[in-house]
Amino acid sequence: MSKIGASILRGFEEAIAFAEGTADISLYQVHIPPEIDVKAIRGRLGLTQQEFAIRFGFSVNTVRHWEQGRRVPEGPTRAYLMVIDREPEAVQKALRIA
């Protein structure tokens, strides 16, 4: 088997183990950056502060404070903002009222 084929197979096996709950979770890590640029994320999405706040469940004052450097998002919020930055449609879909 080629290296690429072996890598794909290993990834598939890891995905199955993770889905089944049998994976060794100590092997998986997440990277949450110590700083996150909320204004840049909002800008990439083309939203005003108010639109961004409403769309993703923040208060507009909190968004303003982050962007002005008066406050910084804490760990879980930074993770949420990373997901918003990378997969905004998925977040919007998950938050949509059924």
Image (cartoon, rainbow, N blue to C red):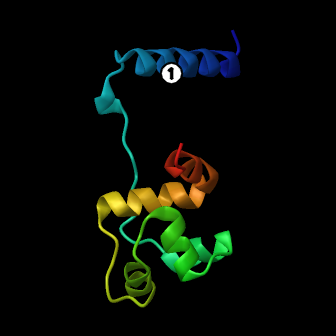
User: Where's residue 88, x and y in %?
Assistant: 60, 56
In the displayed structure image, the side of residue 10 where residue 30 appears, left or right? left
Residue at 54% x, 65% y: name it: 55
- In this rendering, is residue 70 above or below 5? below
- In this rendering, is residue 98 above or below 83? above
Residue at 50% x, 51% y: name it: 95
| Residue 86 placement: quadrant | bottom right
User: Where's residue 62, x and y in %?
Assistant: 37, 79
In the displayed structure image, the side of residue 78 where residue 1 appears, left or right? right
Within-10-Å neighbours for mark 1: few <14, some 14–19, many 20+ = few
Residue at 38% x, 88% y: name it: 69
Image quadrant where one finds the C terminus: top right
- In this rendering, is residue 4 above or below 41? above
- Nearest the viewer among 93 and 29 is 93
| Residue 63 placement: quadrant | bottom left
Residue labelled with disc 1? 15
All told, the count of numbered labels is 1
| Residue 18 placement: quadrant | top left
Image quadrant where one finds the N terminus: top right
Residue at 35% x, 68% y: name it: 34
User: Where's residue 12, x and y in %?
Assistant: 57, 18
Q: What residue type is labelled 1?
A: Ala
User: Where's residue 16, x and y in %?
Assistant: 49, 15
In the displayed structure image, the side of residue 55 where residue 70 appears, left or right? left
For this orientation, the residue located farthest to the top is 1
For numbered disc 1, what is the local secondary structure?
A: helix
